[in-house]
Image (cartoon, helix red, strand yellow):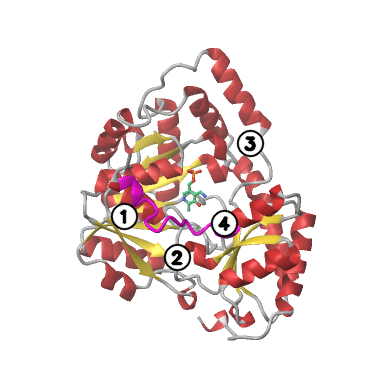
Amino acid sequence: MKASARLSTLLPDGNDGWDLYRKALARQNAGMPVTMLTIGEHDIGTAPAILDAMDAAARRGLTGYAPVPGQNTLRARVAERIERMTGTATAEENVLIVPGGQAGLFASHIATLDPGDTALFVDPYYATYPGTIRGAGGLPRAIVTGPETRFCPSRDALAEAAPGARTLLINTPNNPTGQIYDRVTLEGIAEACIAHDLWLISDEVYETQVWKGAHLSPRALPGMAERTLVVGSMSKSHAMTGSRIGWVVGPAEIIAHMADLATHTTYGVPGFVQAAALWALQQGPDLEAEVSAPFRRRRALAEQALAGNNRIRALPSDATMYLMLDIRPTGLSGSAFAEALLEAEGIAVMPGESFGHAAAGHVRVAMTIEDEAFAEALARLARFAETCPSGTPTNYEET
Ligand code: PMP
């Protein structure tokens, strides 16, 4: 029996770009040592105090069906957080609690696209984006960026892509590039959304992992709150990847429709998980800083390991648990470099090509192993690159 066309187009070529990751896992399963710098998951687990809050809530009886749009206390807390971040009035009815950012991305596209509508996204992109759009019935259209703009979409690229589209999906702080969109970039995005009457779906799941500068949510920009859906998650901010909890924040009317959608899909998020999330958010920024501190430290370690290397240029890492390395000076593609690195050193990194076309000639390093092993892996990666032949030099200072 055949699956629906909708499902079979999630990955139209049957390839999600994660071949290298699977190869690395296969080596590991065969008993070969592999240093995994691939997946965006913390090496610390969820804090025991958050688990205690979850356990206590479950024992208090929060194990039945929970309110579908989310518990009012949690919705109010998220509203307060978003209002503080954006300076834009935000209330409970603007917040839908969802089982993780990915569910929020899918629900947001279902809520804004009719079948066959064009949905924009920015290349390089988080691996699920085109499939999420197709799964929601949309036609994905990429806005291709490049290293010369640090992979931020320019006004020209937006103006070219926007006519006829219905939605635009952005991600700041960005996976895989480690960049934050600055005010000028976001104003360009807002201008394009208003001019072409687009919904903006703003994936802000890395909002707490900022090392330089500040995160700005487009919900804060004039005329944008009414057309923006902010997708947030506790996965990265609180190392709660397995708890599956996040939110979508937007205009009350569409959030109410999305609650109807939740009734027909997820039927809400477990009450004990919501209680743990509320407790975690109530701890404020100190807990979030603690969760992101290892990445801040490792970013500095990577800088030291790569200093003076003339085959690798690290894209300035302003945010996230990832580093984007430009390996074009080796003359290799990202895939060829990653394959050769795995073969020679047993180190697995993600080829830039796994994230679309724009990041070809780059690799993404996840800073997700403990400090000493990370520093050692980066030193080996740097030495390995020096053994590669020379290709095209790059210079970000010019941009
Ligand atoms: N958006 C981006 C950019 C991501 O990197 C991820 C997870 N790696 C997600 C959304 C989904 O996160 P979650 O569903 O765990 O909240």
In the image shown, does 384 or 179 lie closer to the viewer? Answer: 384
Q: Check contact, mark 4 vs mark 1: CB within 8 A.
A: no
Q: Is residue 285 left or right of residue 118?
A: right
Helix, strand or loop at disc 1?
strand
Pointer 3: what residue?
A: 46
Residue type at the position of mark 3: Thr
Q: For mark 1, does the 10 Å Cα neighbourhood hold few (<14), some (14 to 19), or many (20 or more) residues?
A: many
The verdict on residue 115 being magenta is no
Mark 4 or mark 3, which has the lower sequence index? 3
Residue at 21% of width from left, 64% of height from top? 195
User: Which mark is nearer the camera, 3 or 2?
Assistant: 2
Q: Secondary structure at mark 2?
A: loop
> Which residue bears the numbered disc 2?
356
- Could you tell me which secondary element the residue under label 3 belongs to? loop
Question: Between residues 380 and 175, which one lies in front from this camera angle?
Answer: 380
* Front residue of 216 and 156: 156
Q: What crowding class fits label 4: few (fewer than 14 Cα within 10 Å), some (14-19), or many (20 or more)? A: many
Q: Earlier in the sequence, mark 2 or mark 4?
A: 4
Q: Quadrant of residue 373?
A: bottom right
Coordinates of residue 107 in the picture (x, y in percent): 33, 42
| Tag 1 residue | 200
Looking at this view, name the residue that lies furthest to the front: 1
Q: Seen in the image, is 313 located left or right of residue 144? A: right
